[in-house]
Amino acid sequence: MNYLGAPESPLMTESQPASGRASPQSLDTSRSTLQPDRQLKQVCIECGHAVSSLFTEYGVGHIRLTQCTFCKSFADKYVEHDVVIQFIDMLLHKPQVYRHLLINKLEFRQQFVERNVSKLGILLVLFNVYIDWFRLEEGGRLRGQRELLFGKQHSFGTQYLFILLVSAVDAVALLAGNLLASIVLQRNIRLVKRWAMVSTALIVSSFGKVLVILLVIWDYHEIYYPWLLDFLQFTSQTTAISVLLDTSVLWAGLVVIFSVAFKQLVHYAVIYTSSLLF
């Protein structure tokens, strides 16, 4: 389903010839690492139709936003909005902000994950270590176990490294499951080459994990709180994937559900195998 009316999803948009592009001054990604004679498609964040540029620069600090010829709205209002406004709209699950981040920021559409996004991904894995540690402690307490791992005595370093490894494997499994489901949905094996874009979408839409710091500040002991963060991550990832694949929220939700199920399968396989080795 192509609810945006675009010829194909942004994920599969190939580089286009330079003949139809705007001048470098009119693109907010003029310092992108793209080749100088090729460019990726940018879209109107309201309707999803392609635009030649996001704004035109008339001087230092003076720009004019491009108006979409299809819906007559500004092509990308977030060009003038700061990060705080974008974060609030991400909390509100507005697809427009995800089109701005995942499609119109060309540095997020390269062959490898952008450097700052990679740092955020590492930070999210570390946050996930704390959540997994919290769940293991609560699960052991409910079972009457004092030891964190498999009811056996292990050093703090061993426990932390093990949970860190499991969290990293979970992140890779989530990406693999998402790619597999996307390939089936789009019926295009070339999506494998777009793994960096899918990774960026998953990382950016996992901002809810940052709220795990509330567990440290207010010392929450309710076991349902991490599950609320997981639900927030699920809904935000569904919104991001629906934008990236240019499909309905329903199909995007099924993609995310499959990827989460695949991640959990790998997670339990790692835990079971480790329980036999430790």
Image (cartoon, rainbow, N blue to C red):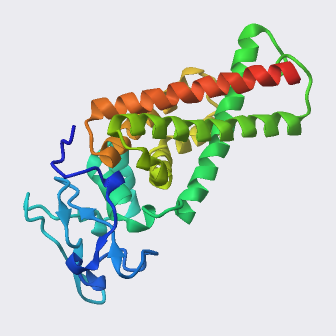
Judge whether residue 63 can be spotted in this image.
Answer: no
Q: Where on the picture, by quarter, is residue 210?
A: top right
Q: Is residue 200 above or below residue 64?
A: above
Question: Residue 194: x and y, percent?
Answer: 45, 53
> Residue at left 40%, top 61%?
83
User: On the picture, is 200 further left or further right than 28?
Assistant: right
Q: Please state, as top left, top right, bottom left or bottom right, where the C terminus lies in the image.
A: top right
Question: Residue 264: x and y, percent?
Answer: 59, 25
> Residue at left 20%, top 76%?
20
User: On the picture, is 32 further left or further right than 4?
Assistant: right
> Residue at left 62%, top 35%?
170
Judge whether residue 72 can be spotted in this image.
Answer: yes
Q: Please state, as top left, top right, bottom left or bottom right, where the N terminus lies in the image.
A: top left
**The residue positioned farthest toward the top in the image shown:** 143
Question: Residue 2: x and y, percent?
Answer: 20, 42
Q: Is residue 193 above or below residue 249?
A: below
All told, the count of numbered labels is 0
Q: Is residue 4 above or below residue 17?
A: above
- Which is nearer the eye, 171 or 245? 245
- Which is nearer the eye, 3 or 120? 3
Question: Residue 123: x and y, percent?
Answer: 62, 50
> Residue at left 57%, top 54%?
120
- Which is nearer the eye, 91 or 186? 186
